[in-house]
Amino acid sequence: MFAENVLSVLQRNLSDIKSLVEAIPGDHLCDQSSSFPPETLCHPIWTLGHLCGSLNGMREELRDDFSLHPGRSKEWDQLYGQYSDPQADPHIYHSKDELLSKLDFSFELVKSRMLQIDRKEWEGPMPDERYHEIFPSLAHVTANNFIEHSSTHLKLLILWRFYLLRY
């Protein structure tokens, strides 16, 4: 039941994010505001790519099989990673359609893996030992990443749209 509940919230957040992005005119998808540092109010294209990378990063924590569908690359992390700096140049990024498709595909991979995990594995530690003190179990890190992280980016995208597009 844990996986289903987390997936439900994640799917709803991603659906809301996709709806917001689909309604934004293409020539505004990489707009940046000089009023906000890029790391606090990121543009929609960066947000989509970042969430794709986050889903694939969590596939590592979920011990997914990467032989058929590789995860994120070093190049991906440079464009969309946690410490990347969103740029206003749309030519350096993937297209909106490509990112929306990749987001859906990444979600399906995560969903498939999450539904295979049993209670014992959810209660066990996550593979990345650096975060064991913060996230004592795989369930903790999964709930944080898929609920809190996606909710934060939904909120930031709503703020971006309000401040930059005034709607």
Image: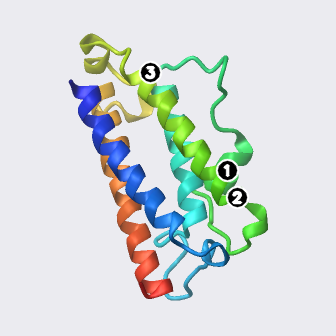
Q: Say which residue appears at 55% left-offset and 52% top-offset.
A: 50
Q: Say which residue appears at 45% left-offset and 77% top-offset.
A: 161
Q: Residue furthest left?
A: 1
Q: Disc 2 or disc 3, which is closer to the eye? A: 2
For the residue pair 68 and 54, the one nearer the viewer reads as 68
- The residue beneath circle 3 is 113
Residues under labels 1 and 3: Cα distance? 23 Å
- The residue beneath circle 2 is 95
Mark 2: secondary structure: loop
**Horizontally, is 106 left or right of 3 in the view?**
right
| Lower position in the chain sequence, tag 1 or tag 3 | 1
Q: Say which residue appears at 54% left-offset and 73% top-offset.
A: 24
Which percent across, then down, holds residue 76?
A: 68, 47
Cβ atoms under marks 1 and 3 closer than 8 Å: no
Q: Is residue 28 visible?
A: yes
For the residue pair 30 and 121, the one nearer the viewer reads as 30
Marking on residue 50: none
Which percent across, then down, holds residue 56?
A: 55, 35
Cβ atoms under marks 1 and 2 closer than 8 Å: yes
Which percent across, then down, holds residue 2?
A: 23, 27
The N terminus, quarter of image: top left
Identity, as a three-letter code, of the amino acid under mark 3: Arg
